[in-house]
Structure formats: structure tokens, C-alpha cells
Amino acid sequence: MLAAAAFVTGCSGGNPYYDPDKRHHTPDGFRNNYIEGKGDASFLKWQWERLTQGLPKPPADGYATPRTEPDATWLQANTQTTSATWINHATVLVQLRGLNILTDPIWSERASPFSFMGPKRHAQPGLPFAQLPHIDVVLISHNHYDHLDRATVLKLNAQAGGAPLFLVPLGIKPWMNDIGITNVQELDWWDKKTLKGIDFNFVPVQHWSARGLSDGFRTLWGGWAVQAPAAADATNPDPSQAPFSSPFSFFFAGDTGLSKDFDDIAKRFHRFDLALLPIGAYEPRWFMQAQHVDPAQAVQIHRTVHADKSIAIHWGTFEMADESLDEPPKALARALQQDGIPADRFVTLKLGETIRF
């Protein structure tokens, strides 16, 4: 809740990355492309409504986000098959071209700077941390506690076989260095990092950043567009028989409100084989509209970026807003039906479930 309060109060202090030629840079931090200011919604009004109305309501069938037993042995050995495994919240393990890529990892019991307060976990991760394959790349979308978890990134940094490469927005590298994580590269919007032939592009979305009451908008936020070109097997002269004969791309939106940023992304990247799109933490709309899409808006993003398949994230783990924890998948199903999109084009996975491409 500290971060939500900062959405209203804004930031203080200078921006060491400031570039006056970039509109999203400000002398004090960063701003969105298509909304001005830092929002005028009342955080205290929202909290009062939550308290007086007893929100969020518990799920009708109890706190039981669907889960399945992960095939950890296969995930640890897999180097050939492109796959995506929903672990929890916005944490997805994507296996691509022999790289193990992890998005916004969180295994902690609370999405909070405190062990005794803040959003508490209602569902255990679908894959225990100890069963992870060696992680090569960690993608961070922004610094809110449910997306940048200190305990988890420290454990990843200490994994056997060496630390992963942490790709982060501008301003987060100093924070990571301060806690002993040094294999970090930070990117501005539209910057690209290439690793083993895969392009990791940092792209704008509409959100904000903060880890306290006075650092709102100080560090950047965004999504990731990842592109792996076709790669013929050097030992096989027939490209049609190569394991990576086709290109593959995916989009990870992190946290976002609906904006024209997705039109801009679509113009640059044209289409994605897979999109990881948030569907939770959207009520009440008067407060969350600018920062979190609802399921119907997530479907709109699915269409805009021309995703062949989308996986719903950012639901079922922490009560971050006022809708019941089990409501987002129901709302998503209604939105897909209303738009005439087959249910298998935009899916909600069970915790621990893997899709293979």
C-alpha cells in the first residue's frame, strides 16, 4: 500500500538519467506517454471504502487457485522446446532457445517491505524455488513489491551455477548493486539487449514506480518484447528439420493501464506468438483505471498487439485490489465470449501448468 500512496504523491529528488530530448524523462524522474501528471485519485478514499465495505470479499469457493503438479524434471532438462509455465502472480518461466527466462519473480509470503503486513500470499507458487532450472535471464518490469521482490532476487543471484542476468528499467540497477547483485543491465524505453541471438526490447506501458512514500516515478517501468529469430541447426543442412527453424516472440506487459502504447508496440513488432497479460487488481475502476487493466481491456491488448496466444497473469495469488481473488478469470471468460475470441486463444493456466509450443 505504500506504493499505491506514492501514485498520488509523486516523487522528489533529481533524475541522474534525465535526457531533455526524451519526453518521458523529467528532471525528477519519469512519466507516462499518454497521461499527464501523477493521477488525482484519492488513495485514502479507496482505503476507506475497502474498510467500510469489507473489500475484497473472499472467493465464494474459498482460497483455492487451481493448480497442477509441475513437470519439474522436464523443465530442468528442457533445452529444445519453447515453453511457458505460470508460477504465480506475474512470475512466468519462459524457456526459449535454451535460455530459461523468468519474469517478475516472487516466492515471498508477502508482497511488501514488511514480514508482518501488506498483501499476503493466498496460493503457494506453482513451482517450488528449489525445482527451478538454472535461470539465465530475469526480466523486471518495475519496482513495486509484487514485481521486484528482494528476497527472491537475492536467492536467484545466489543460484548454483552463477547469477542470472537481470534486465531492469532505468534506476533499478543502483538498488540491485546496493544489495550485492552486480550482473545487471538497465534499459530505457525502446532500448534492446541481445543475448545468444535473442533480442530483449524494453517497451513503454502505462504505469508508475515506487517503493516508499517519497520515491514515486523515480525509476522507470515498462514491458518486454522478446524476439528469437529462426536459427538453423548447424549440424543439419536442412533448415526445415532444425529444432529452431521458426522464429518466436513473446510480450510481457508487467503492470499496465490501457493506453496508445500498445498501438506503438504493435507498429514496431507487428505480432507476437505469445503475450503474458495482467487481468487482476482492477477494482475499483475509478482508482485503478490509469494503472491496471481489467480483463476486458486485457482482451483489447491481446487484439492490438496481434498475439497468437495469451496467458493471463497477475491474479490468483495476492489480494492487491477490491475484486475477489477468483473473479478475474470469470470476467476474462465473459470478455472473450463477448468479443468472439476462442477461449484457447487467451487462457488462464493452473499454478504450475506448462504450455509447450
Image (cartoon, helix red, strand yellow):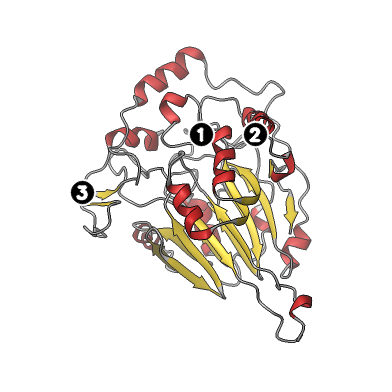
Question: In the figure, is residue 255 to the left or right of 238?
Answer: left
Dot in front, 1 or 2: 2
Looking at the image, which is closer to me, 203 or 64? 203
Q: Residue 36 at x, y = what percent?
A: 29, 39
> Which element carries disc 3, helix, strand or loop?
loop
Looking at the image, is mark 1 or mark 2 earlier in the sequence?
Answer: 1
Residue named by callout 1: 119
**Residue at figure coordinates x 53%, y 51% from the top left:** 104
Q: Amino acid at mark 2?
A: Asp
What residue is shown with label 3? Answer: 13
Name which residue lies at 38% across and 38% down.
3
Q: Position of residue 327 (x, y in %)?
A: 63, 27
Taking 286 as reference, is 9 above or below it? Answer: below
Q: Neighbour class for label 3 at 10 Å: few (<14), some, many (≥20)?
A: few
Q: CA distance from mark 1 to mark 3?
A: 28 Å
Q: Disc 1 residue type?
A: Pro
Q: Is residue 189 left or right of residue 161?
A: left
Quadrant in which the N terminus is drawn? top left
Decide: marks 1, 2 in contact (CB < 8 A)? no
Quadrant of the rendering where the C terminus is positioned: bottom right
Under circle 1, the secondary element is loop
- The residue that disc 2 covers is 339
Q: Nearer the viewer, residue 195 or 343?
A: 343
Q: CA distance from mark 1 to mark 2?
A: 33 Å
Mark 2: give few (<14), some (14-19) or many (20+) Cα within 10 Å. Answer: few
Tell me where residue 294 appears, x and y as whole percent. 54, 33
Which is in the foreground here, disc 1 or disc 3? Answer: 3
